[in-house]
Amino acid sequence: MSTFMAKAETVSRKWYVIDAAGKPLGKTAVAAATLLAGKHRPEYTPHVDCGEYVIIINAAKAVLTGKKLEQKYYHHHSGYIGGLKSVQYKTLMATKPELAMNLAVKGMLPHNKLGAKAITRLKVYAGETHNQQAQQPTVID
């Protein structure tokens, strides 16, 4: 019996909704990254993009455990001398919760072309409403 290898043309993608309200940010990001990479599928092939579309709602209501709100920082650099910017996660979750969730999921995906393509299929919303009702997404607990 030979090993089955999925083809990029034959992959059919589904839409899933993950509600982040009251759940840890990291656990929600793990569930989203698994679906985006396609690792939940029996026909998963490492070199083929087999992932699904994922919608995360209530990103503003996701929780950070422990002292992460005060101790964790998001750093980014402008590329210029002295251009390091740091934002505390308490501020980030209050102002841009979509960015915090997006960064958590992006860090869990492979850092190559497949991961870059997969992150484009992620839609994150701070509130309960999303714009993808027409795709009839399946709700994941």
Image (cartoon, grey):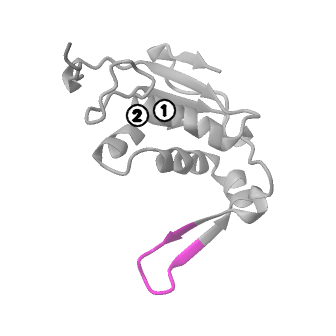
Q: In the rendered structure, find residue 37 and report the number of the disc placed on it.
A: 2
| Residue 87 vertical placement versus 19 (above, below) | below
Does 78 lie within the magenta span? yes
- The image position of residue 125, as x and y in percent, is 59, 36
Q: Which residue, as the protein is rendered here, is positioned at the far front?
A: 1
Where is residue 129? Give x, y as percent.
62, 27
Q: For residue 17, which numbered disc appears in the image?
A: none
Residue 53 in the image: state x and y as whole percent: 43, 27
Vertical side of 103 occupied by 24: above or below:
above
Q: Which residues are magenta?
A: 75-85
Specify the farthest residue to the bottom.
81
Residue visible at 52% across and 44% down?
105
The residue located at (53%, 77%) in the rendering is 84
x, y percent for residue 33 = 49, 37
Q: Does 86 sit above or below residue 35? A: below
What residue is at 33 percent from the left and 19 percent from the top? 43
| Res. 9 image quadrant | top left
**Residue 34 — which label?**
1
Quadrant of the rendered image containing residue 68: bottom right
CB-based contact (under 8 Å), mark 1 and mark 2:
yes
SS for callout 2 = helix
Query: Is 31 a magenta residue?
Result: no
> Which amino acid lies under the numbered mark 1 shown in the image of this protein?
Thr
Q: Against 97, is 28 above or below?
A: above
Question: Left or right: where does residue 120 sit relative to residue 139?
Answer: left
Q: Amino acid at mark 2?
A: Ala
Cα separation between marks 1 and 2: 5 Å
Task: Classify 10 Å Cα crowding around label 2: few (below 14), some (14-19), many (20 and above).
Answer: many
